[in-house]
Amino acid sequence: MDKEDYRIRRTCCPSCNGPQPGITRRGFLQGVGGMTVLGTALTGVKWSSLALAEEKAKGWQRHTLVVKPILVYDTPQRKHQTSWRSWGGIQTEEDAKQEVVRIEKELKGLEAKADFPIESCGTLATAELCQNIYHHLEVHEIKERFRRSMKIGNVVFCAVDQIETRRLIWDAVKDKVNFFCDGRMSAEVLRILAACDSSSRKHYPSTLFGSGEAFVGPCTAKTTIYCANIAAGLMLAQFTRYLRQLPIDCDIQLNLLASELTVGGGR
């Protein structure tokens, strides 16, 4: 096994805590392959043979481990006299394409080395992932920046990083849509805002503020995937209540770390 000293940071920002001992994703994959070879060399018996014998004896059914990687990234745009670029290797669409190739190559290598069945499904984009869940779903991808002149439907889910972008989108669509939902999060704190009637439409603009007032956390705080999943579920929950003509909660704040839920803004 490669004896290279793999190190990671607790956060992605170079000023936070300094490097900490750990292991990278690629180091983990190399380690898994190395341990498989080591186990075979030491025992002279493949793990799959031992596992298969035990499974037959106990009547167990072996299932394949299915890996469905999803690559989440953004492409920062240069801004004058401000910190506009996050820490990380993916800065452009070309960087993302190269990373997809690397991920898929490593997964194939893991499939070949691992002594248990693995099935990798490639790096899925959001549209493809949705269609895998529901094959009849019709998805139209618009791979360009939002513009006021864009044709939109009557429902908008807003999931962007910058508060100024939220203001731009709201000003452009507020008189065109019947339901608007905005998801915000940082690390383990999330906020869901919905606007579909006079009171909620009046409340939403009060949650917008200048970019200088925005909390700037480490960029790893934007990729806490389980928090993002919960936020997505709450956004859909508000939408289903709207569809069923039930009252919505126009302002929900959830702190997962402290287990605190706050519902405000009236109904």
Image (cartoon, rainbow, N blue to C red):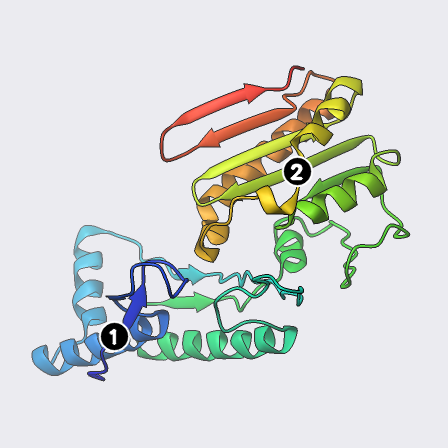
The residue identified by callout 2 is 209
- Contact flag, marks 2 and 1 (Cβ < 8 Å): no
Residue sitting at x 19%, y 70%:
47
Q: Answer with left or right where residue 69 lies relative to residue 54.
A: right
Residue sitting at x 18%, y 51%:
58
Q: Position of residue 97 (x, y in %)?
A: 60, 76
Q: Nearer the viewer, residue 202 or 224?
A: 202
Q: Amino acid at mark 2?
A: Phe
Tell me where residue 214 sits by quadrant: top right
Q: Is residue 262 above or below residue 11?
A: above
Tell me where residue 180 sits by quadrant: top right
Q: Answer with left or right where residue 226 lies relative to residue 154.
A: left
- In the rendered image, the quadrant that contains the N terminus is bottom left
Q: Is residue 214 above or below residue 42?
A: above
Q: Is residue 192 above or below residue 211?
A: above
Residue sitting at x 63%, y 46%:
211
Task: Indicate which disc residue 2 carries.
Answer: none
Task: Indicate which disc residue 31 carries.
Answer: 1
Instruction: Report the Cα–Cα distance between label 2 and label 1.
Output: 47 Å
Residue sitting at x 79%, y 55%:
146
Residue 75 visible, this orientation: yes
Residue 114 visible, this orientation: no
Say what secondary structure mark 1 lies in. helix
Q: Position of residue 183 (x, y in %)?
A: 61, 39
Label 2 environment density (alpha carbons within 10 Å; few <14, some 14–19, many ≥20): few
The nearer-to-camera label among 2 and 1 is 2
Say what secondary structure mark 2 lies in. loop
Q: Amino acid at mark 1?
A: Gly
Q: Position of residue 227 (x, y in %)?
A: 47, 42
Q: Position of residue 88 (x, y in %)?
A: 48, 69
Label 1 environment density (alpha carbons within 10 Å; few <14, some 14–19, many ≥20): some
